[in-house]
Amino acid sequence: MLISRMVVKSIGLVSSIILARLLLPEDFGIVAIAMAIYAFIDLFGAFGFGTVLIQKQNATVTDYNTAWTFKLLFGLCAAALLVLLAPWVAVYYQDPRLTAVIYTISLMAVLSGCTNIGVIDFQKNLDFRKELKLQVIPKLLSFSCTMVLVVVLGNYWALVFGMLVNEALNVIFSFYMNAFRPRFSLASARELFGFSKWLMLNNAIDYINKKVPILLTGQLLDSKAVGLFSVGEEIALLPTSEIAAPINRATYPVYAKLKDDKAELRKAYLNTINLSASISLPAAAGIAFLAPLLVPTVLGPVWVPMTEMMQWLALAGFVISLSSNVGYVFMATGSPRYLVFTNVLRAAIFIPALYFFIKLYGLTGIGYALLLAASILMVVTHISIARLVALDAFAVLKVTLRAIAASTLMCLALYGFQLLAGNWPDLLLLLSSVALGAVVYGSLLLLFWQLAGCPDSLEKMIVSRYLPGLMPKDNSTT
């Protein structure tokens, strides 16, 4: 899953970098506002039936058919509602271009509703190789299409049509890769909604946390600021959205199988936190440290105003990655209401802080607000999970301490290197810093692991599989 997500995001990141060179922040801003409206409508149909089908180990064909039927019906209703709202949204944001964009994006709702529900079995049965193919192949094809469109059209329509092509390819490949053929049925509606009502409420609150910043930024600042924020967030939160997220997605079905064994569940959770921190922390620290060099070198001078915001968002992303996995434990154990509580708490902190900090600090205030909310939420979530699986008070710190120490020393090494480099060309300095950071972090992580007695962890998995000569003789098996 991690490889799958990283490949998909690498394609998306390369696409964003190329598009940032060819388009303007305003182009990204228009699409970001339209997609925020789409997400608002879509959250009412986010029944979470896929999550229910994974959690329900004995799900029937009728359950799958019912889940698909609701999804399709909602897709049709969502498309109609988007068409009705489009002119009003354009008037509110004083940008008539939004009308046609939202009309086009409404087709995505219909396509999303058609996707074959049978592909949820890839996750449920831990068949992540097929999951990788399902995500990567459509993304590669739509990427190629978007690149052609941006050359031909030269504006925001390349982004819009690219997303539409990607959604259509997802539908095609979902039926090609899975033999299940859904039928219309509502027979299991009552049973599925018994669990998913909490997920629907959680999705509504999650929308507030993720999309209100875009809408609020557009209202308090302008569409250019929205474009700067959307691109800056995509890059800064890579450690969260593209490293922690696939790890979480892969561990959820495992947690569901271990839900009645608290000791094994606790072990699986700590292993996941170790894996997530070991990968996401150096990535977040690297993005925060290198942002002043990365933004003008890779994206261009027009994107420089988002640099400081990116640095704070990257730090917030790591904090989020440490607490994001907790919700999957509670879902797997049949307590989805916990997700609602934590997201309500985050919104109650984040939205007022967002308004306050944007007023005071402009675009950079978004980073301050997210870091504040994420830090408070991390404390609350770890207190809650400690009670559920009987965790030691310092258990999470123990499994993340090596990554924290190695990342801190990595940043110090990069600082010294850049002082010594002097007037190197920016691109060469950036590439050299990335390479040096990876080597320094990896070496220090392995050193600290050996000093800690070679415990079960990501380091042990890598060493035993690829560097067996470094394994102690009395600890050579996994």
Image (tube, rainbow, N blue to C red):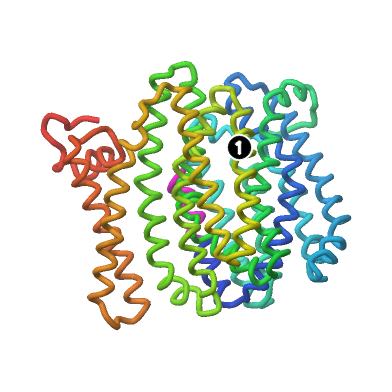
What residue range appears in magenta?
A: 1-11
Classify mark 1: helix, strand or loop: helix
- What secondary structure is the stretch in magenta mostly built from? helix
- Residue 319 lies left or right of residue 401; in this view the side is right
How far from the left and from the top, in percent, is residue 45?
75, 40
Q: Is residue 4 on the magenta stretch?
A: yes
Q: Residue at x 54, y 30 (%)?
A: 124
The picture places residue 216, in percent across and down from the top left corner, at: 69, 59
Q: Is residue 25 above or below residue 272?
A: below
Give the left or right position of residue 221, taking residue 370 as reference.
right
Q: Nearer the viewer, residue 285 or 193?
A: 285
Q: Is residue 359 left or right of residue 311?
A: right
Residue 206, picture quadrant? top right
- Quadrant holding the C terminus: top left
Q: Nearer the viewer, residue 27 or 470?
A: 27
Counting from the top left corner in percent of width and height, residue 212 is at 68, 53
Question: Does 66 sit above or below residue 71?
Answer: above
Q: Residues within 10 Å of mark 1 (few under 14, many from 20)?
A: many
Q: Is residue 127 visible?
A: no
Q: Give the image location of residue 27, x and y in percent.
A: 67, 72
Specify the amino acid type for callout 1. Val
Res 363 seen here: yes
Q: Residue furthest left?
A: 473
Q: Nearer the viewer, residue 386 or 430?
A: 386
Q: Which residue is mark 1?
A: 119
Q: In which quarter of the view is residue 315 placed?
A: bottom left
Instruction: In this rendered view, identify the residue nearer to me: 239 or 120.
Output: 239
